[in-house]
Amino acid sequence: MHLWKKSEKARLELRQHVFVNATQTRLLDRMVSPYWRRPRYWVDDPYQPYQERNNFWSTRKKPLPLCRIDENMWKTLVTASFRPFQARKVSLLAPCCRQVDIPVDPESHEPTIPPYEEKPNEPTQTKRARLLYQSRKRGMLENGLLLSTFADKYLGNMTETQLKDYDRLINLPSNDWDIYYWAVG
């Protein structure tokens, strides 16, 4: 039995078991369409290089290439796949064979610390709040933890001269080791 006869038989059997209206009948005909209703070159057929379709400008069917890659397309594909490698210099050698001359963290890329400037006419409450914030924002290193704990305990009871000394102590970058040795002792 031919393929189209089998599909026609299946369509008729489905119509007998299920009550269908006109729209459902058309859908059924599309679902179980006989082989001869299909286009000459079906998309699923890997051996046929063309697919027929209606052109936008004409109603007659023209063969359309499914997957034909010419030389220009290959050039485009190769260029597109190698373009990321052109943007950044990537060594194609193994990591053990590379020669690294550039230091990992060059000194020139470090952020500069602004010079310390005393604020002579700052109110005491504002100075206490600023010093408490600066003590807490230092981070998780030993100095930062020590200073935040120290500021939390003693900053509220300091005099004006003690606040001035503490301000100079935490804001000058050369005092980090002094603070550590002073606290650890």
Image (cartoon, grey):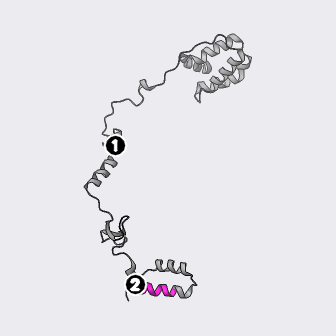
Disc 1, SS: helix
Foreground of the two, 92 or 114: 114
Kind of residue at badge 1: Phe
**Residue at screen point 73% across, 19% down:** 156
**Residue at screen point 33% across, 73% down:** 41
Foreground of the two, 59 or 173: 59
Picture quarter containing residue 144? top right
Residue 169 lies left or right of residue 45; in this view the side is: right
Can you tell which mark lies on residue 4?
A: 2
**Residue at screen point 33% across, 75% down:** 40
Figure quadrant of the C terminus = top right
Mark before the other along the chain sequence, 2 or 1: 2
Residue 51: x %, y % from top left = 34, 69
Residue 100 lies left or right of residue 163; in this view the side is: left
Residue located farthest toward the right when viewing the structure as drawn: 157
Residue 127: x %, y % from top left = 68, 17
- Viewer-nearest of labels 2 and 1? 2
Vertical placement of 121 versus 58: above or below?
above
Total marks drawn? Answer: 2
Residue 121: x %, y % from top left = 67, 11
Are the two marked residues, 2 and 1, in contact with CB atoms closer than 8 angstroms? no
Disc 2, SS: helix
Vertical placement of 119 versus 99: above or below?
above
**Residue for badge 1:** 85
Foreground of the two, 62 or 48: 62
Foreground of the two, 145 or 159: 159
* Residue interval drawn in magenta: 1-13
Q: Is residue 72 magenta?
A: no
